[in-house]
Image: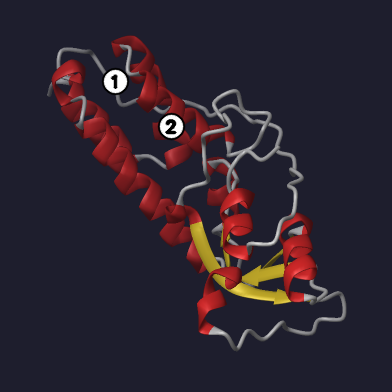
Amino acid sequence: MNGFESLLAVIEEQPLSRSLPRVLSTAITIGADDLACWTKLELMGYFPENPAMTDEVVVPEYRSVAGAWFDDFGRMFLLENPDLHFVNELRLRHGVAELEGLATATGPLSMRELNNAAVIRETLKVQVTTFEFDPRSISQVLTNIRVHLLDRVSAYRGEIAPLRVTREAVEPEVFKLAPEFYGVSVDLKALWRRLFGRGS
């Protein structure tokens, strides 16, 4: 089994929190800077504390989960305009280790997303504070990340094949996650896209 086949086996058999550190090590070895950068983002999360999170990086659409917004009294924000469906989607910034933990939840997950809520308040004049969604959505996000990982690794098949890649597990590092503040403007769609970038 060559290095590429061994790495694929690691990706297929191990949780992402264990396979991504191996991919990162491999990417650094072969000088695949784009793969290394993407791997750091998925491991450490799409937060400004992550050195890989530059002004050009946007939280990928494949990290989106559908849900609903609520205010502090538990009242749901009902959107009647189909053109605003994207408001009821949230792109998760968390690193894969935290996502794997969240995916094991047995009930609905609630997140206080004050930055996104501020956009809704300013543009739609509705006071919301909490985004609620089904944890099963996270399983799909993890599957999406794994598919993108396989695609990105496959692009370097020739460079990885000569390497010696073991299938032993690598313990992931634990990284500090913190929220981020974004500005508000008039165009809600543009704001929503901006929310998933680095911001100012």
The type of residue carrying mark 1 is: Thr
User: Dot 1, crowdedness within 10 Å: few (<14), some or many (≥20)?
Assistant: few
Percent across and percent down for residue 91 are 55, 56
Up/down of 153 relative to 77, above or below: above
Up/down of 180 relative to 160, above or below: below
The residue tagged 2 is 38
Residue 32 left/right relative to 42: left
The residue tagged 1 is 166
Q: Which one is nearer the viewer's eye here, 60 or 185? A: 185
User: Dot 2, crowdedness within 10 Å: few (<14), some or many (≥20)?
Assistant: some
Percent across and percent down for residue 89 are 56, 67
The type of residue carrying mark 2 is: Trp
Please report the residue visible at 56 percent of the width from the left and 75 percent of the height from the top: 84
Tag 2's secondary structure?
helix
Please report the residue visible at 46 percent of the width from the left and 48 percent of the height from the top: 60
Please report the residue visible at 48 percent of the width from the left and 54 percent of the height from the top: 63
Measure the C-alpha gap from mark 1 to mark 2. Answer: 22 Å
Percent across and percent down for residue 33 are 38, 19
Of label 1 and label 2, which has the lower sequence position? 2
Up/down of 189 relative to 9, above or below: below
Tag 1's secondary structure?
loop
Q: Which one is nearer the viewer's eye here, 1 or 27? A: 27
Q: Quadrant of residue 129?
A: bottom right
Q: Quadrant of residue 6?
A: top left
Residue found at the very far right of the displayed protein: 73
Q: Which mark lies nearer to you, 1 or 2?
A: 2
